């Protein structure tokens, strides 16, 4: 009888149903009797619900009375500390990489300067008879202009650039030997480096220099006298028809392609009796006269006069002969010496004396002579 009332032996763990399939009934009454003792033992062992105090079996994490879970049954929260450290480290590395890339781009775009040592090539120089040429020297690369070292052209030298054939040799000044007395005509030899040597000029050299200066001053041609556009007229004392002459203004217009013409009279060929008259408006000193003609071979005379009007005929005493009969053999003739005797003249006449054989013509088609340009010059400046 006693054995039936005793507790049966505990079943094996594999034979016990899971706690979730055999829910425990909520205790009835207070903590008195055996239920109170079991709860006290469960609380002592720590297997009770933290919310309502209901005892929990081994492996039971949820209270079937209030539905609360056992603390820690859902697992602990993950530790995010290492992840934060990794994220911060990755951010620092990314920032460093960005700074490095920016620095690399800036360095790439910045202009780069390279220090290059240029070594000029050595070119043999012509030896000087009196003084040997010193060895060519080159500044030491990176130096500040102090001591210099001789340039080496051996095969072992490491030159940055090959020798250039256009390099200029160093200039070497050689002493100039003083010529001996009585041998002034000889000149000392020039130095091989091309530097010109100077010597004391002799009296003969001084005389030649003065002569050349005088000749250059004498050869300087002054500017022509400026004339009015209507300063030239046809001088026709024997009243030939006006159709026998061209426009006199074309002889002073500065254009050699234009010309003043005069007809040759067939009955008096080759003699002429007309000319070109120029009015200077006031007495002016004359030095020379230049004539341009497309019909060379004619003979002319130059006259000068003063007064309000030019003399009516060539035989009047008012005319002064400035140049005798002159045959114009070239297209341009310069009469350099006029017989002015330092006098001034207002009127200048180019008198036509004879026509060339090429201008004879015929009674049906008479020949003509022409003057394309007449220029008057003042006296040359005295030296």
Image (cartoon, rainbow, N blue to C red):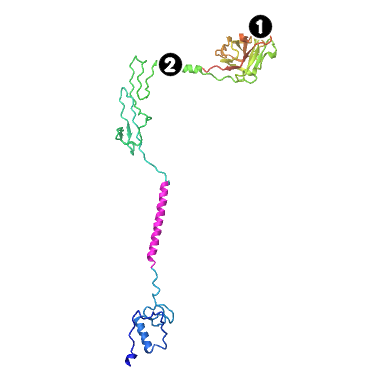
Within 10 Å of the Cα at label 2, are there few (<14), some (14-19), or many (20+) other Cα atoms? few
Give the camera-side residue of 343 and 363.
363
Report if residue 92 lies within the magenta region. yes
Q: Answer whether residue 34 is visible to the viewer in this image.
A: yes
Quarter holding the N terminus?
A: bottom left
In percent of width and height, residue 251 lies at: 62, 17
Which quadrant holds residue 350?
A: top right
Measure the alpha-carbon separation of dots 1 and 2: 54 Å
In percent of width and height, residue 16 lies at: 36, 81
Report if residue 372 lies within the magenta region. no
Residue at image position (34%, 90%) is 4
The mark found on residue 163 in the picture is: none
Boundaries of the magenta span:
79-108
Within 10 Å of the Cα at label 1, are there few (<14), some (14-19), or many (20+) other Cα atoms? few
Residue at image position (69%, 14%) is 243
Give the camera-side residue of 118 and 73.
73
**For residue 236, above or below residue 21:** above
As drawn, the residue found furthest toward the bottom would be 1
Which quadrant holds residue 363?
A: top right
Residue at image position (32%, 92%) is 2
Can you identify the residue that label 2 sits on? 208
Which quadrant holds residue 62?
A: bottom left
Under tag 2, what secondary structure?
helix
Magenta region, main secondary structure = helix
**For residue 222, above or below residue 157:** above
Q: Earlier in the sequence, mark 1 or mark 2?
A: 2
Can you identify the residue that label 1 sits on? 268
Under tag 1, what secondary structure?
helix
């Amino acid at each position: 009888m006693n054995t039936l009332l005793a507790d049966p032996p505990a079943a094996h763990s594999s034979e016990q149903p899971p706690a979730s399939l055999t829910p425990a009934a909520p205790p009835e009454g207070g903590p008195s009797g055996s239920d109170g003792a079991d709860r006290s033992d469960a609380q002592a062992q720590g297997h009770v619900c933290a919310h309502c105090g209901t005892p929990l079996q081994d492996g039971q994490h949820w209270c079937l009375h209030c539905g609360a879970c056992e603390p820690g049954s859902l697992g602990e929260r993950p530790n995010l500390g290492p992840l934060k450290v990794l994220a911060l480290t990755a951010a620092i590395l990314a920032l460093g990489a960005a700074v490095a890339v920016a620095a690399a781009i800036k360095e790439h775009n910045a202009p780069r300067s390279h220090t290059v040592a240029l070594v000029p090539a050595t070119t043999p120089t012509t030896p000087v008879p009196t003084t040997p040429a010193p060895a060519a020297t080159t500044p030491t690369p990176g130096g500040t202009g102090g001591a210099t070292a001789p340039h080496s052209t051996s095969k072992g030298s490491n030159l940055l650039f090959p020798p250039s054939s256009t390099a200029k040799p160093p200039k070497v000044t050689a002493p100039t030997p003083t010529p001996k007395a009585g041998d002034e005509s000889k000149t000392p030899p020039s130095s091989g480096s091309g530097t010109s040597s100077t010597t004391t000029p002799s009296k003969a050299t001084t005389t030649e220099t003065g002569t050349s200066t005088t000749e250059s001053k004498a050869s300087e041609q002054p500017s022509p006298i400026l004339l009015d556009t209507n300063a030239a007229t046809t001088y026709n004392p024997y009243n030939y028809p006006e159709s026998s002459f061209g426009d006199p203004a074309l002889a002073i217009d500065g254009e050699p392609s234009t010309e003043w013409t005069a007809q040759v009279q067939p009955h008096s060929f080759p003699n002429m009796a007309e000319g070109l008259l120029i009015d200077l408006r006031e007495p002016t000193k004359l030095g020379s006269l230049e004539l341009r003609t497309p019909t060379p071979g004619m003979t002319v005379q130059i006259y000068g006069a003063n007064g309000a009007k030019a003399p009516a005929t060539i035989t009047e005493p008012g005319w002064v002969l400035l140049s005798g009969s002159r045959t114009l053999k070239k297209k341009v003739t310069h009469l350099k010496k006029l017989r002015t005797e330092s006098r001034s003249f207002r009127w200048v006449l180019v008198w036509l004396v004879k026509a060339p054989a090429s201008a004879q013509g015929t009674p049906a088609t008479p020949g003509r002579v022409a003057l394309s340009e007449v220029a008057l010059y003042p006296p040359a400046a005295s030296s």
